[in-house]
Image: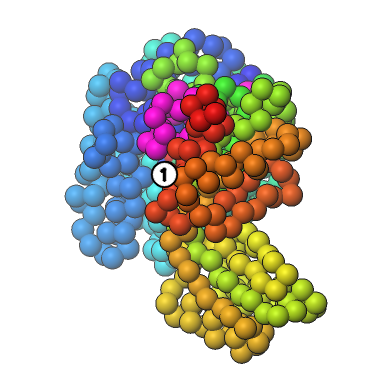
Amino acid sequence: MKVSKFGGTSVASAQQIKKVAAIIKAEPARKIIVVSAPGKRFVEDVKVTDLLINLSAAALRDESTKEPLAQVVARYSEITDELGLDNTIKHVIETDLLNRLQADKSSPPLFADSIKASGEDNSAKLIAAYLTSIGLPAEYVNPFDAGLFVNDLPERAQALPEAYERLATLQHKQTITVFPGFFGYTRNGTLRTFERGGSDITGSILAAAVKAELYENFTDVDCVFAANPRVVNNPVEIEQMTYREMRELSYAGFAVLHDEALMPVFKAAVPLCIRNTNNPSAPGTMIVAERDHSLHPVTGISADSGFSTLYVSKYLMNREIGFGRKLLQILEDEAISYEHIPSGIDNLSVILRSHQLTTDKEQRIIDRVKSELNADDVHIRSDFSMIVLVGEGMNNQKGLTARAANAFARTGVNIEMINQGSSEVSLVFGILKADEQKIVNELYKEFFEPALVH
Ligand code: ASP
């Protein structure tokens, strides 16, 4: 049995949903289908989830919801009409939205979660109706009824362990299950959404629960590329990579899959395949537990901007017990998480995502580090990018760091920070954002087109 998840662009229009149906029809093993809300049909289009966010915001401000509601209903109407479905499903969707808008607004996040989740919920109802209408008996399954129980965090819920046991029974259904992505329910029946892009997570949870032979994640690209195609000209396609490699790549800018979506399938050892709804004959990228890395020690190069460094130096820091803890406590007090802590003998840098900082926070941190830790020097600098070179093969291949350093030397780009995680699956370089594209291209040449540089 396969669990197949179709993302927003795959269900954005009647034409796309017809492609989804053809994919389901082509393989009877595709028994559990997870769907997103209709996404963008063209670049300037607005996703239904974003229309729903506008709708819930208008309702919470007690403004008229007529226009934003009409926009959502219009998207579904257009799809149902073009699919040749009768008015029943349209009526179900409109009534559902009106009911949700009538709900109690005393907890705005709770109200907003319910409105947002209607995107996936109604998409699943519509697609189940369509599949049935073309002779593929399908059933919409509600996440509460199926037991997708989550904790109580609005907008970033996480599945509870018992959910897996409950959801396992879905494998016994005779008909095709159409399951809405993006949300679950607390044990007492309160709806909670995952983070944005969270339908990937639903698919992964379901695939793990039913121990699927494969979790297929259908999107709008043929595969995962070894580098960002907007930066590198015609990068190679990654045919296969490990869960750990995907995790490292998605950390810094590879946005093909929500990063929380890897864990459930990884734990259950279910392989994952990224595939293209618009080109289903392309084999896609397989994500597996182990791969033969003798030929390609490096799998991909990712890059992400928006990092800051907090630099602290103090003579004899290495001998001071508790220095690191006290420094991190200051960050914890400001509710800041960190990414890396490269350190020297008398200094260290804490690298963090810049969006967490404000001018006030920066000043408070600097003042406290100076006064409480008696640091000799402390400053915060921003506009850094992290370049991540990812590959299982780095573990036992000598000379890879030297090759990367050569690529840096050729461009003249200064390495501000270098960090080889203890997993040895990645090498992380901190550089100034301005140098990002230049260095990604040079590293790509070094590891994927060596004939051009040697
Ligand atoms: N529709 C939601 C979003 O746009 C969830 C998803 O598509 O995965 O974030």
On whether ligand 1 comes within 8 Å of the CB at mark 1, the answer is no
- Residue drawn 46% across the image and 28% down it: 235
Q: Say which quarter of the image contains residue 383.
A: bottom left
Which range is magenta? Answer: 214-236
Residue 354: x %, y % from top left: 47, 64
- Residue drawn 62% across the image and 83% down it: 376
Going by the numbered disc 1, the residue's amino acid type is Gln
Q: Is residue 142 visible?
A: no
- As helix, strand or loop, the secondary structure at mark 1 comes to helix
Write down which quadrant ligand 1 falls in. top left
Residue 270: x %, y % from top left: 68, 28
Residue 212: x %, y % from top left: 66, 25
- Residue drawn 45% across the image and 65% down it: 382
Q: From the image, which quarter does the N terminus lie in? A: top right
* Main secondary-structure element of the magenta-colored stretch: loop
- Is 312 a magenta residue? no
Q: Give the colour scheme of this rendering.
A: rainbow
What residue is disc 1 on? 437
Q: Nearer the viewer, residue 103 or 63?
A: 63
Q: From the image, which quarter does the C terminus lie in? A: top right
